[in-house]
Image: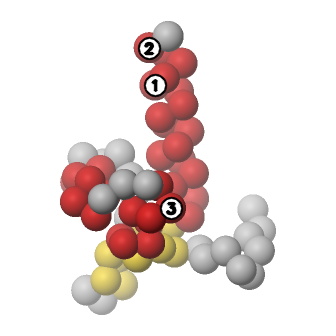
Amino acid sequence: MTRPLSEPALYRVPDAARVLGLGKTKIYELIRGKRLRSVTEGRTRLIPAEAITEYLTLLEKEAEEAA
């Protein structure tokens, strides 16, 4: 999938938290719980844009199953 140049391919944790409307602590919990995929570059934890999309899809699926 091609992404517009204005949209980042990787988000730092504070940026991913802002995009998802969550706190940084919650983002780290999701990463530890393997609900949100991440990668590291050096000492920096990064969340791929695709991982954010996958997480939102997971939330929608869980909501449908609960209904």
Q: The residue under label 3 is which amino acid type?
A: Val
User: Residue 47: x and y, percent?
Assistant: 43, 67
Q: The residue under label 2 is which amino acid type?
A: Ala
Mark 1 and mark 2 residues within 8 Å of each other at the beta carbon: yes
**Residue mark closest to the camera, 3 vs 1:** 3
- In this picture, is 29 found above or below 63? below
Structural distance between the alpha carbons of marks 3 and 1: 20 Å
The residue drawn where x is 57% and y is 51% is 53
Which residue is identified by label 3? Answer: 19
Horizontal arrangement in the rendering, residue 46 relative to residue 57 (left or right): left
Q: Tag 2, which secondary structure?
A: helix
**Between disc 3 and disc 1, whose residue precedes?**
3
- In this picture, is 57 found above or below 67? below
Horizontal arrangement in the rendering, residue 2 relative to residue 13 (left or right): right
Structural distance between the alpha carbons of marks 3 and 2: 25 Å
Decide which of 46, 22 is in the foreground and name it: 22
* Residue count near mark 1 (Cα–Cα under 10 Å), binned few <14, some 14–19, many ≥20: few
Could one spot residue 66 in this view of the protein?
yes
Disc assigned to residue 66: 2
Horizontal arrangement in the rendering, residue 9 relative to residue 23 (left or right): right
Q: Tag 3, which secondary structure?
A: helix
The residue drawn where x is 56% and y is 64% is 49
Which residue is identified by label 1? Answer: 62
